[in-house]
Amino acid sequence: MSPKMKWYDYLAINSYWLGINTTSAVMTPVLLPYLVLLFMPPEQKNTSLATVRVIGLSVAMLIQPLAGMLSDRNTSRWGRRRPYIMGGALFNVLFLGIIGASTLFVDSSMDGFFGSTLGIPTAFFVLILGYVLLQVSSNFAQGAVQGLIPDLVPDNQRGRASGVKAVLELLPAFLVVFIGPLVDSGKIWLTLAIIMIGFLVTMLTTVLFVHEEPLQEKPKTSMREPALRMVALTVIFVLVSQLAVFAVKSAGTLLSGKGASLGVQVALVGLAGLFAMAGSIFVGVYFGARVGIGQEAREQRPFILWVVNRLLFLSSVGSIQGFAQYYMSDVLQLENAATMTTTLLAVVALFLMPAAIFGGTLADKIGRKRLIEVAGLVAALGTFILLFARNIPLVMISGCIIGLGAGLFMATNWALGTDLAPKKDAGRYLGISNLAGAGAGIVGTGIGGPMADFFNALQPGLGYIIIFAIYGGLFVISTLVIHRIKVPEFHAAEG
């Protein structure tokens, strides 16, 4: 019988997730939308936000699995994972400073200094640069930290460990409720300083209190082939998703040019958007994972389907979160949109956290699949309610239902992934799962942003309703996909 881990072991192993997710909880729904709107014309804000995220997340998609593979082979006396976590955190602080420096160019961003060569305002260029570099350093650490649970936690305790991980991923939703007013008042440097401190504290907790056994001998197999596969995987997925963006834009332009009615454009371009998002996920993941995994892919169909399910779900929940501030401002006409966005996230977290704790423990007893299926349907219900929300109370109700589904998903889905990933290559396989992490933003925001601007130009606020309806559809499809996964024999009783 495996020795039972203590509660503080679970916290130490997962502590750096708090730093990572404090950053994403601030950056994705609050800080990036604020800065993009500060630097770019309002009618282009959704497309501009999509541009920043797609570029940064494309880099993340490549870096994270490479970092996972490097940490799998690391023979440092400090262990395989911790040196990468420490280095990544230190560089994160530096690159967050570059993002802050973008605000120094606000007054000069319209003078055409960069516009004559790059066609974008100076401030927006610096923002993209800082965000891309942050994705490099942050994902270098994240690729390593993903290996800690498979490395150190016995199989029969991974549900609890994943539940703690989910709680630390969700806890920032409460913390950032204090960030919204800072952003609304323009205190960007103070906001960034809070993120920097979070990285440093959680990194030190991991480095000092997690005990790894050093790898005695570096694997003799070359990294060249798998590294090239990661590059090809990233190129394939980004290319597929951007072709989908082009197809949706072309459909919208064609229908608009032919004078199609608003109802026809909503129906046809909306369906095109749904097929584009779902199709790019299936095609991108299947071809990308086959390239990334290699000949083993035929034996890893359950793992590939798990990545598809994860990407469908995260594309939806992450994109709803990412566009929430603009929805608050444009549809609900709120002046303090950043503050209300963080308040919404905190209320949602009241349902997320209990669901994550309950889901992680329950998953160890009755099975991952059933809970993940329920999570997709619950999140879809909450999203469809959001389509009719025109006031804060109904938005809060919708968000709490989505939060309930997301909490169950986050705890149980990751536990299933650690079951399906081969233990000896856990860093590489779970790094490949970053198709779902980074790919979620590339698909959901990358396609949704231009669609939102297209429909908002036809009727103010309509764009958010269309893309939210698509995200609800993706939740439903994610449930259908997880149902087709065959779990390993030792979990066969889980359904």
Image (spheres, rainbow, N blue to C red):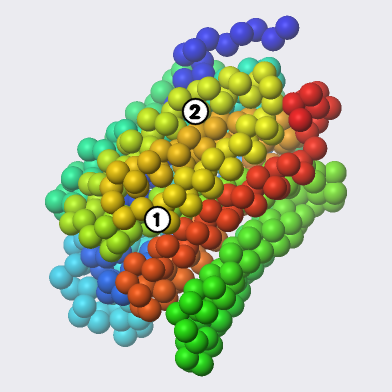
Q: Is residue 460 above or below residue 331?
A: below
Left or right: 15 in relation to 181 = right
Q: Which residue is mark 1?
A: 388
Mark 1 secondary-structure assignment: loop
Q: Secondary structure at mark 2?
A: helix
What residue occupies the far bottom of the structure in this picture?
Answer: 258
Is residue 166 left or right of 36 when viewed as pictured?
Answer: right
Q: Which quadrant of the view contains residue 179? A: top left
Task: Name the kind of residue labelled 2 in the image.
Answer: Ala
Q: Which mark is residue 355?
A: 2
Q: Split into 4 quadrants, where in the image is the N terminus?
A: top right
* Rendered residue at 53%/10% (across/down): 6
Q: Residues within 10 Å of mark 1 (few under 14, many from 20)?
A: few
Image point (34%, 46%), residue name: 394
Q: What percent of the width, then of the height, locates residue 306? A: 69, 43
Q: Nearer the viewer, residue 349 or 264?
A: 264
Asked if residue 37 is positioned above or below residue 410 in the image, the reply reads below
Report if residue 238 is visible in the image.
no
Task: Tell me the quadrant of the picture where the C terminus can be found.
Answer: top right
Q: Earlier in the sequence, mark 1 or mark 2?
A: 2
Q: Quadrant location of residue 333?
A: bottom left
Question: Disc 1 marks which amino acid?
Answer: Phe
Q: Position of residue 262 (x, y in %)?
A: 45, 80
CA distance separating discs 1 and 2: 25 Å
Q: Nearer the viewer, residue 206 or 299?
A: 299
- Looking at the image, is mark 1 or mark 2 nearer the viewer? 1
Q: In the drawing, what numbered circle is on residue 86? A: none
What residue do we see at 51% from left, 38% from top? 406
